[in-house]
Image (cartoon, helix red, strand yellow):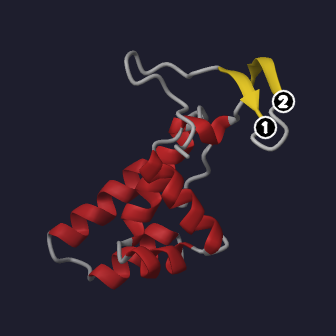
Amino acid sequence: MHPVLGMCPVCGEPLAITRLHCRNCDTTIEGRFYAGRLAQLTPEQLQFVEIFLQCEGKIKAVEEKLKISYPTVRSRLRDVIHAMGYEASEIEEDVSEEERKRILDDLANGRISSDEAVELLRGDR
């Protein structure tokens, strides 16, 4: 069985589910059904959400499982939040965008280590 498409492959707009069918008793129901915000995610984003939930939302565990950095986990999480239709203002940030840029600039110029940058980006310091 194929996964349900949430977005139109032609124009990119959300698809409406209009028919449900039971394979066991052959009942068919027609109408307009809402699949929820998760249906708007790409397969890659949905896989990320599944891993995020398996890790109980612990970013460090997601980092280890996917073998990606903290900023990459945060970026993918922001992408998922945006894809689900939530505005950036609804997302609580650990550090401001200006502070994040300063931290990454310090890291790029060797003023801080990668471990220090991760701690600062997490808001642990």
Distance (Cα) linking label 2 and label 1: 5 Å
Q: Are marks 2 and 1 in contact (CB under 8 Å)?
A: yes
Query: Helix, strand or loop at disc 1?
Result: loop
Q: Which mark is residue 6?
A: none
Residue 26 is drawn in which quadrant?
top right
Residue 76 as seen in the image, left or right of residue 92? left
Residue 60 as seen in the image, left or right of residue 90? left
Crowd around label 1: few <14 · some 14–19 · many ≥20 (10 Å): few
Find residue 125 and report its horizontal and vertical position in percent: 51, 78
Q: Which residue is mark 2?
A: 27
Task: Please name the residue shown 65% across and 36% down the image.
Answer: 37
Task: Please name the residue shown 50% across and 58% down the image.
Answer: 47
Task: Please name the residue shown 50% across and 70% down the image.
Answer: 122
- Identify whether 93 is placed above or below 90: below
Find residue 25 and report its horizontal and vertical position in percent: 85, 38
Find residue 99 and report its horizontal and vertical position in percent: 40, 57
Amino acid of disc 1:
Cys
Amino acid of disc 2:
Thr
Residue 33 is drawn in which quadrant?
top right
Is residue 32 visible in the rendered image? The answer is yes
Compare residues 10 and 92 and report the one nearer the observer: 10
- Identify whether 18 is placed above or below 54: above
Find residue 8 and report its horizontal and vertical position in percent: 46, 22
Q: Which residue is mark 1?
A: 22
Q: Earlier in the sequence, mark 2 or mark 1?
A: 1
